Amino acid sequence: MGESITFWVLAVVSVIAALGLVFSRRAVYSALMLGVVMLSLAVLYAVQDAPFLAAVQIIVYTGAVMMLFLFVLMLVGVDSSDSLVETIRGQRFWAIVAGLGFAALLGLGIGNTLIAAPKGLAVANQNGNVPSLAELIFTRHVFAFEVTSALLITAALGAMVLAHRERTEPKPTQRDLSRARFVEFGRHGKNPAPLPGPGTYARHNAIDMPALLPDGTVSPLSVNRVIARHEAEEGTLAPEVAQILQQEEEGK
């Protein structure tokens, strides 16, 4: 009874999360929905007396793979728009072919389970879940296992080759960057010093707090323009920052 209730509850949650993953317009929401699906699958594996698959689902997929997605979101940004231009010719056709092939394999798998007589969990795990799983992988399904391993290694190498870029010029050092800043200062009068760090109020340390100069006044360079314009509309903007914004508007 408890197994059936767990299955139907998590099945509904998994389907709703999967639909949210597909139809969500924000990459962050899609990543969160993917995490919900993976955790639900892990619980279903554990209920079906497959502790090894449940642990792998949490450690490898929910842990490692989700961290990769989060790193990609951190690098790309949550507000970046996807390009709709096809850079690979014929990718839609091959995507449809791959989808039909996956649907055929899924149908064969479901049909095999419906036609063949079930053995039951007691027979499948008579030697233990992990030893029985290892025996199937390295005896009956060893060819598929090795092919999958080769594909994963090839995909990793292909990703590194595609992401690698040959550097046509030497990488600038800190000395070169510092010298370039002072050259810009001599030519255009641009301040060579780095921007002041935000969040230097006495009881605050947040990125939305401006930095303070040695005399205690607000440093306009550390104020985010979006926050500055919002405060300007409300009339709570510091006079120094308002003056900088006015100068920028006159320069445009």
Image (spheres, rainbow, N blue to C red):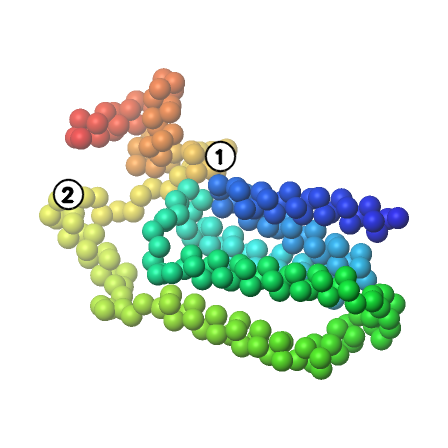
Judged left or right of residue 211, residue 52 is right
Figure check: 172 above or below 229: below
Q: Nearer the viewer, residue 132 or 65?
A: 132
> Residue drawn 62% across and 64% down?
105
Image spot of residue 121 (x, y percent): 84, 65
Q: Nearer the viewer, residue 99 or 251?
A: 99
Judged left or right of residue 83, residue 205 is right
Figure check: 31 above or below 46: above
* Residue 81 visible in the displayed image: yes
Callout 1 amino acid: His
Label drawn at residue 189: 2
Image spot of residue 182 (x, y percent): 18, 52
Q: Residue furthest bottom?
A: 139
Tell me how far mark 2 sits from mark 1, CA to CA.
33 Å
Assign a secondary structure to mark 1.
loop
Residues at circles 2 and 1 in contact by the CB criterion of under 8 Å: no
According to the picture, the residue beneath numbered tag 1 turns out to be 204
> Residue drawn 12% across and 48% down?
186
Callout 2 amino acid: Gly
Where the C terminus falls, by quadrant? Answer: top left
Whichever of callouts 2 and 1 sits on the residue coming sooner in the sequence is 2
User: Around disc 2, counting alpha carbons within 10 Å, would you say few (fewer than 14), some (14 to 19), or many (20 or more)?
Assistant: few
